[in-house]
Image (tube, coloured by chain):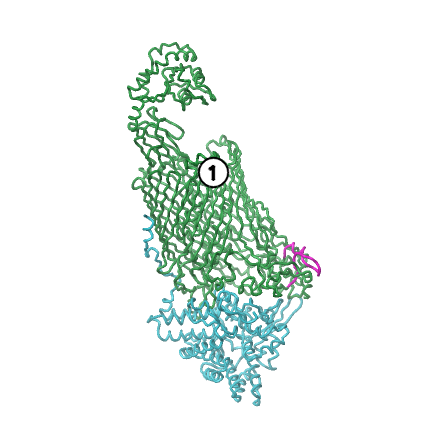
Amino acid sequence: MLIPVLFLFSCNKLIEIPEPKDTLTTAKVFLTDAQATSAMAGVLTKMINGTLSEASPSFRGKITVLNGLSADELIVNGSGVDVFASNSLNSFSTDGLWKTAYETIYGANAIVEGIAASKSPALKAKTRLELTAEAKFIRAFSYFYLVNTYGDVPLSLTTDFNQTRSLARTPSATVYQQITNDLLDAVKDLPEDYAAGGGERIRANKWAAKALLARVYLFTGNNAGAVKESSDVIAQTALYQLETSDLNRVFLKNSSEAIWQLQQNSLVDNTGTATPEGYALLPDSLKTGAVSHSLSPFLLKAFEPGDLRRSKWVDSTDVKSGNVTSRYLFPYKYKTGKFNRSIGGVATEYYMVLRLAEQYLIRAEANALAGQLGLVANDLNILRRRAGLGDLSNALNSAQLLAAVAKERQTELFAEWGHRWMDLKRTGQATAVLSLIPAKQPWRGDYQLLYPIPVEEIRKDQFLTQNPNY
Amino acid sequence: MYKKFTEYFCIPAGYKDRSPVLTGAVMLQQATLRGLNWTLVMKLITGLLLLAMMQVSAATLAQRITIKKQNAKMETVLDEIGKKSGYDVFVDLKTLKSAKPVTIDVRNATIDEVLKKCLEGQKFDFSIEDKTIVIKEKTSSFLDKVVAAFAADIEVRGQVVNKKTNEPLSGVSIKIKNKKINSGTNIRGEFSVSKLDPNSIITFSFVGFDSVQVRLGEIQGLQDGGNTFSKNVSITKISEGYFVTVSLEPSVSYLDEMIVQGYGTTDRRMATGNIARVTAEEIEKQPVMNPLLALAGRVPGMVVTPNGGYASGVVKVEIRGRSTISKNFTSDPLYIIDGVPLTYLEIGGNSNYQNGSSGVMQGAFPSVGGGQSPLFNLNPTDIASIEVLKDADATAIYGSRGANGVILITTKKGKIGGTSISANFSQGISKVTHYWDMLNTRQYLDMRRQAFKNDGVVPTLLNAPDLMVWDTTRYTNWQKELWGGTGKMTNMDVALSGGNESTQFRIGGNYTRQTEILTASGANRKASLIFNLSNYSLNRKLKTNLSVNYSYSDVNNVPTPNAVTLAPNAPPIYTSDGNINYQEWNDAGMSDRNPFASIKSIIRSETNLLMTNLNLAYELFRGFEISSNFGYNNSHNLGGGMVTIASQNPIDNPTGSASYLTNDNQNWIVEPQFNYKTDIGKGRFSALLGATMQATKGASQTIVGLGYEDDNLLGSIALAPFKMYFDKSGQYKYAAVFGRVNYTWDDKYVINVSGRRDGSSRFGKGKQYGNFGALGLAWIVSQESWIKNILPSFVSFIKLRGSYGITGSDGVGEYQYLTQWSSAPNYVPLYTYGGITPLASMHAVNPDYRWQENKKTEGGVNLSFLKDRINLEVAYYSNRCNNQLLLLPTPILTGFENVTANSPADIRNSGWEVTLSAKLINTKNFSWTVNMNGSVNKNVLLDYPDLEHSPYATEYFIGRSLNAKYLLHYTGINPLNGQYTYEDYGGDGMVRIKNSVDLPGTNGDDRYLLTTLDPKFIGGFGNDFQYKNWNLGLFFQYKNQMGYNSSYIGEAAGSMLNIGADIYSNHWQQPGQPAKYARFTTKSELSDSYVNASDLAYTDASYLRLNNVSLSYTVPEKVMKNKRLRIFVHAQNLWVYTKYQGIDPDTQNFGAMPTAKVIIAGLSLTL
């Protein structure tokens, strides 16, 4: 009859639609150098700027604040209990890093795969190598923060959801191995200059990869590797010099100390020309505005008298509420905040991710751990002198040197990317230091040193397990 | 001819000489004597002339008679006729003995009519000549048989028209009793049947019209020239036979009401599918701007939910329960307006299951109300009817697009007749129905102080600015402040319509303006012009119908902040100079918590919607029509929002920003069709073969201007210091061939088969086509003669029907099978990085997903009683949804939170629907009509392979509704510490909800009670009273459901949020005190947040709502002459009966604005 005949009908012309105008397929993205570079810009902008509606990826100042609270660096102002400040996280506490990091990793994986699959001659060999290397650097960077926040994490190296949707956790040693491999590849193929960013230090180069590799080696106990990689970076004196003339110059954009900065787009609603940390940590108005987080007394106590970092990188605000005035201290490393940022203006600071001072500290620590005690003080003294402090005694033993490194890290790297939190954890000091802090009473146990994996993720991936005690 | 015959042969010689002075009675006596002779003579002459004698007309006589007799003897009646008329009556008294008693009641009738009536059903004939009536016995002699044999070749030709509009009706079924002749009218309504004999009875029947029977025997004997035989038949004798004009009257029976179905029409009597109809009258009575809202409660099995109180907001429509487990796709049915689908591409990412489609506003920043419903632009007064297609039989012809049901909207058409103008004018107001009963300042401050005391915390400037900084003597009723306004509504309609037999037109115009009850809000305005033109060519073979509907709407509203729970002593919204009062918030250290910023922002949405449709049909040969539907619609929306500097906190050093959006959606469709209708055997056969080609394009562009230093510049994008641009676009193509075969045998058995092959651009290569089809059967039980005989007489109609079919769905959005890199991957743009425009992946890619299948089964019974005055329809359905398309949740570690895929979930929605329509009283002056409907739907997840390892492991449960929840069992307030306590079901010493990871009731999770928020029963109940010129309509809506008890906000009372007065008066205050609500505290404990997940928070939220009241008075015709004037008052949402404790059982979110009540009054004039 009539009906069966209908089922033979099939005309693909009628339902063929052209590819969408506002989007490109993967194949088209990796046709040319310019478009492939746009894909990299997509990954980087999501890390720092988010999108118009969702402007709070975790790499955007959140690690600094949350890790700072978890450690003994920042305290919360105002009423209410902050689960990070009191180290009382539960399985519903969210830090947001998981999502940001894995979205970044997806972007990096997509670039690695897209370039590998592209046969386009317009995508030149040099671009292929450099973008692949940069993507691997970004991937390593993301995994570094994942593994330091959650411990063992699933290792996703592909965009194929069929392979990644039911991943189990990978031992952190394996994750570190992957980080190391990616960074070694990045070191090999990344350019030595900043040409990709038009001279601005906003795109990772070989030295950025080495700087991160040095940190990874330090964290994984490869002291020799850490010394070697950090020395390589420090040796690039033509590119990198400590800002010795004025501490206030350290965090400016493209400062001579900057190895890798992320560039905030000054059109971003609210933050404008401010860096994420400046926006999050500086008061509404410089001398009288409220701050939601302030520096903890433990950090302030760590500064030696006369430390220029205490006077130049820390400031205070007197907040009036009714007829009572309270004083709060805040990090003033970053100079652009809510009170002086402008939307669409020209930024004076970029978001510092890797800087030279850390490399001195890495080398000092690695040398101390490797027993090269004689080399330690020199690197520390370089930073101390800049801070207006005297040199360390030449007679310090290993433990004293390590303590000196820890103190120098605390005062140099405060309010930057959660350094203090990770240092306390990797050196085994966390419980001893944190469990005594009144705001963290009662100390719930070392399980708090790992953040809980988002429960949504465990619900969606039944092979994923939660960290203990959450 | 007959007349001549009577002249020659029926005038007995001498009659003329008979004395006219004899009374009728005497004459009767005399006739008795000679009757025999007369009969003999008659027989002979008749036979010789081969003429059949039946009736004789004496049109020349103007004598009028009134006579009334009940079961009287024929003799008596004839006698009286004779007396009253003054005619002589001749009859054979002997033969009269066999006459049956006569019942007659005629007024002012001619002698001819009286006699006809008197002899009806008798075996007598009469003849009249010159004031003499002759009654004689009918014979079936040899001669008569000869007559019959010769007469058996009568030909009847004619035309059938619609009595109301005078339009020819094509496809009218023509049947001849006891003959195997079945015929129908052609496109001009014409027919011809031949080889008839005087005993033939012709029946004309047509969908939606009352049937008309013509007894051929009765029409013979008419004079030459036109004759009005009865009110529906007029007959002209022509050379070959007769030309009969039959006017069919649109049926007033509920069963014969015409209803629109996919690509055609049917009626309730013959329909095999489930189609509900809402009429223009029902829609017009409701003062709503969006016609979808007029459907609430009127259609069993359909739930209509507006998103918030804004008139322009999106309206979620769900037919027969939730069939998708995905929250990302809408459940909206397919909307078809005059044959053209209103398809919107969901390119903006703002649409989802909960809210429905964001409609014309697909851009990045939707307006208030979650977008804008395209049907908001449609003027309810222009709608002739809305049909809701529910089961497979009704919807399968729409294939994949009809999986969620189909809503057919038909606009009004012109009618034959002089041009008439009808105008409506109405004006009304709306007000909020209730306010939440909240604490005043004294009670609020007391609550706060108790909370601090309970916590052992001293209130400070930091933790209690409401106590320490703000004026504690101040009081504001925030609800009044925000929703205390009076909404105003003005509506004007004018329509012009008319036409002749070949061309009809209707032109309508409308203007509506409405303001919301909100104190800070602009107005909604809309204007529309609608035009409809129908034309038949002279030979009536070519039929053209064009409709054009153009409308403009302007929505100017601001989002209203939810400030109901704001402390009653919080600072006023505005400072004395009209700016937003930030200073007091800043001073209290809460600079970022002032909720009123949006009040000074500006949100605007202007929409132009054009809907056009051209239908051409040509009858190639009898019964075979070739036609095509050409449709185009286009919506163009200009939206925008401005964040002024004045609306922002000055300490943030703000700049202004403005966004400008355009949203375009255009849709064209071409549907060529072949239609064939014929009669086969005792049945009617119709077949439809057609194809659909549809293409839809959607696009939105957004420009955001940033950094304005002056609010006055905000109107211009060119003056924006910085700009961002982004766009979204999508294309959709859809092609299908479809067919439908319908066969109705002897008006008893109906079979309806439809099939379809669909192709959609929404699938990857090789998966684009799918096959769908349905079978519908109906058995009109009451047509069976053996059943007719045993049926009690009050049962007038019984039909059993059933259907089964498969429909599909491609509702997944465009290009999901493609990798897509965009500079605005989440529908909002990425900022450039280092001056480079970024690109990022939009979604995970799965090229393997395929068509979803919905299998629908339905069975139904239609019963009518008392000559169809009471009609009952009961239907049972069971819909299964398999391999449904959804966004399968994936862990974010894959890069995305979900991926488009088919789910193995097997979901069933089954339920009962009952519709009752009854004309309880129907007298000349008073009538009472009742319409009732009710439905129950049961939603069950039947199966989900490996559910425990799926992302839905803790969300859905096999054998349960998708909306089922497991709850803790509440065990009272702990009298010692005033906290809520729950049953430790797991028995591990602590009460826990291990949400999301463990199943309820396992691993220490203590939830075990099961509840579902699915409505148990929904229904509507309408009464319509007509007394003389007064009409009163009352429509009630009923819903039996569990709801969320809005007293509990999931947070302990005592923080800086105002609470319901009930909590204040019944909370725990000291140890040992029994209480209904927990202690006040500023620190919410788990026990406080668990309330929402316990049976304490769920309560009966059933209600009976007087949804609509309409009262109208039509000025009597005597006064108005040919004009019609009606004065009316319509009201919406006047009264609710419920045990629910919140403000309104449909507003379960504490502090949310309830639906307003509306009253309008107006007049309607037809000239």
Q: How many marks?
A: 1
Chain A tint in image: cyan
**What chain does mark 1 sit on?**
B
Q: Is residue B317 visible?
A: no
Q: Position of residue B926 (x, y in %)?
A: 53, 33
**Magenta residues: mostly which secondary structure?**
loop
Which chain is the one coloured green? Answer: B
Residue A389: image quadrant is bottom right
Position of the N terminus of chain B, as image quadrant, is top left
Q: Is residue A467 visible?
A: yes
Q: Position of residue B358 (x, y in %)?
A: 47, 55
Label 1 element class: strand
Position of the C terminus of chain B, as image quadrant, is top left
Q: Is residue B238 magenta?
A: no
Residue A398: image quadrant is bottom right
Q: Position of residue B525 (x, y in %)?
A: 49, 49
Q: Which residue is mark 1?
A: B864
- The boundaries of the magenta stretch are B1059-1082
The answer to whether residue A94 is above or below residue B408 is below
Task: Work out which residue is located at the far bottom of the displayed protein and give it.
Answer: A395
Q: Is residue B1060 magenta?
A: yes
| Identity, as a three-letter code, of the amino acid under mark 1 | Ser
Residue B225: image quadrant is top left
